[in-house]
Amino acid sequence: MAAVSIRSQLRFILNGRDVALSDVAPDQTLLDWLRLSRSLKGTKEGCAEGDCGACTVLVGRLTPSGGLVYEGVNACIRFLGSLDGCHVVTVEHLAGSEEKLHPVQQALVDYHGSQCGFCTPGFVMSLYALWMENPTPSDQDIETALQGNLCRCTGYEPILRAARAISGYAGTDKDPLIAERADMIARLAALRDGARVEIGEGKNRFVVPASLDDFAAVLEASPTATVVAGSTDVGLWVTKQMRDISPVVFIAGLDELKTLAVKDGMITIGAGVTYTEALETLSQHIPALGPLITRIGGQQVRNMGTIGGNIANGSPIGDTPPALIALGSTLTLRKGAERRTISLEDFFIAYGKQDRQPGEFVEAVHVPVPAASEKFAVYKVTKRRDEDITATLGAFRLSLAADGTVAAITIAYGGMAATPKRASAVEKALIGQPWNEATVEAAMEKYAEDYAPLTDMRATAEYRALVARNLLLRFYMETTSGGAPVQVSRYEAA
């Protein structure tokens, strides 16, 4: 690999000003820096874990095609080191002057969308991001955009009325981010000097690799470093668990990890592709994955979190691994210049342990598209529908023979074991049998051979065992009734 130049400054744009920092801790959050170092107090700390949305800001980044996209993110769990080459926009930047509010802000005033006001800046930024992406959103679009914003005193209906009021707002020539877009693209492009960023020394050090090859070299040389993509999990290690994550390698800006391609019935997803970026493609080719993705956190989390990260951290309650295992997905792992491909199912060895060598990382996941004759479904069970951690998640892929017997079936669960895990005994009891209620009820007795779930704050062991059995029955009923899926939201029912 050719020599890489090294820069000891983190460079980005804050609202309209260039920022260059050389003294940044690996675990310094954007929220703390905004409030403590820049006195931008409109961005609030509520939960410090990416749930309430009071800290929402926009981060603009250049796309691989040369465009510029702005996304709402949670500043409380976004690390400052991940922002090299980005445009950070806070609520203070929206209004043209202190005397005149931005139309999004004015709508919340006009429709009484704020009482105590603590959450209001976050709602403003989320609605602003929605308006820039979709100036005429439907009610469902609005509700989806606001999944990650919580208000404890206003009530959501006035906020929804304000959101509807700005639909179709035509003052784009005066909007700061629209009017300045061409200039901002040029400014951000000028920040891309092809250099690796290295700040700090020894253990108190972080690196922003210059390229994918550079990342491979950096991680091979520092195999104990914490790799941070979206920080939707690692951020909580810092804010809630007070863990030391140094040294850190930030990879959110690597375009080479943002590949997304469909070829010969296979979807290849780069490890840096976010849930938001993958949603359209996955929904088009594997429709059952769309509703799953839109229940992963709020929009801010989906804008930051990556499918590769969801796999690599090995959580037993990660939402995508059970579904991807049921689909027969494989992983490309890379160490230095060497690559290997393994089954996703085999990647998970035990709690906190994956089949990944020191210095090796997940580069891509390859997801087979089910055949038209196959039936595939995934069900997520939580205490509340939106923005909640999984208690149990089941994924099912079924192929029936011409005589109605089960030719093949793959069943995988999260939240039932120390890792995402197949229901092998249940599968064995179903294969070759008629796909009917008697077969399914008999197979349900085999769950005890596959899983011994734990009791924790999300659910009891007894509840998980019962839900797992009932999800198989639900899958059977939905695949044989010919009707719509069991209602889980008014939009899906419609």
Image (cartoon, grey):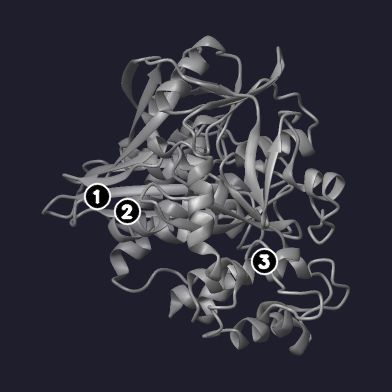
Give coordinates of residue 450: x percent, y percent: 47, 33
Residue pointed to by mark 1: 370
| Quarter of the rendering containing residue 3 | top left
* Callout 2 touching callout 1 (CB < 8 Å): yes
Residue 432 in which image quadrant: top left
Amino acid carrying mark 3 in the image: Met
Q: Secondary structure at mark 1?
A: loop
Per the image, label 2 sits on a secondary structure element best described as: strand
Vertical relation: 134 (above or below) 279? below
Quarter of the C terminus within the rendering: bottom left
Q: Does residue 439 appear to the left or right of 234 in the view shown? A: left
Q: Which residue is mark 2?
A: 376
Residue 4 position within the rendered picture, expressed as x and y whole percent measured from the top left? 46, 19
Q: Is residue 136 above or below residue 441?
A: below
Q: Residue at x 33, y 74 (%)?
A: 483
Report if residue 405 is visible in the image.
Answer: yes
Which mark is in front, 2 or 3? 3
* Residue where numbered disc 3 is placed: 125
Disc 2 residue type (three-letter): Phe
Residue 294 can be seen, yes or no: no
* Quadrant the N terminus occupies: top left
Along the polypeptide, which appears first: circle 3 or circle 1?
A: 3
Q: Residue at x 50, y 43 (%)?
A: 190
